[in-house]
Image (tube, rainbow, N blue to C red):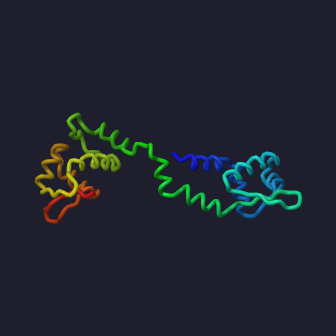
Amino acid sequence: MSEELVAFFKVLSDANRLKIVGLLAQKPYSVEELAALLGLKASTVSHHLSKLAKAGLVHARTESYYNVYQLDRKALEEKSRSLFSQEKMTASVADVDTDAYDRKVIEAYARRDGSLKTIPAQQKKLEAVLRYVVKAFKVGRRYSEKQVNEILGGYHADTATLRRELVGLKLMKREGGGGDYWREE
């Protein structure tokens, strides 16, 4: 998982820091003003501001005797865009086994020989079973309805339901009027 993403969420995981970000989104404040608004000690607010500044979300400028903090909207937008990009989100789940649910369902519904004990009634489980069954068909190859029924018969006697559900879920395509079936990429 992206360390940068985890660090970003850690910084924003504190309720007081979120309140500070919310207040600074409205206008700049000094530490003392934020402390009074939040009912916190100035040292506690300084600690939170330090964490937010380290993450690049706020910055300070000096006014007279005070440091005035403001939200760096541009940095927040850039960080959000960067951290939540498709590539980063995909990378954050790289070590997750995305087939674990399907395997669990197949273990529950398939016999040792690979045939199905029953066709699941629950939609999510049915979809997992259909993803398992469709692997018996080669991508791009055309099959007659008879060939499809022969292959599906190895999984369950109700070939019509399996055939209809495979087409309905768009795991297989079919030409109208009893034509060919095929599996696309």
Q: Residue furthest top?
A: 112
Seen from the viewer's position, the closer of residues 16 and 74 is 74
The image shows residue 64 at horizontal and vertical percentages of 88, 61
Say if 67 sits above or below 119 in the image.
below
Q: Nearer the viewer, residue 83 or 118?
A: 83
142 shown above or below 152: below
Seen at 78% across and 52% down, the residue is 38
For this rendering, which residue is in front, 103 or 71? Answer: 71
Q: State the residue at coordinates (48%, 57%).
A: 86
Q: Residue furthest left?
A: 146
Front-lying residue, 146 or 100? 100
Residue 171: quarter of image: bottom left
Q: Is residue 160 left or right of residue 103?
A: left
| Residue 79 picture location, percent across and down | 60, 58
Residue placed furthest toward the bottom = 176
Left or right side of 52 for 185: left
Horizontal side of 119 relative to 180 (left or right) equals right
Question: Is 116 drawn above or below residue 91 in the view shown?
Answer: above
Name the side, left or right, on which 146 lies relative to 102: left
- Image quadrant of residue 163? bottom left
At 66% from the left and 52% from the top, the residue drawn is: 55
Q: Position of residue 2 (x, y in %)?
A: 53, 47
The quarter of the picture where residue 66 lies is bottom right
| Number of marks in picture | 0
Q: Which quadrant: the C terminus? A: bottom left
Residue at 24% over, 50% down: 134
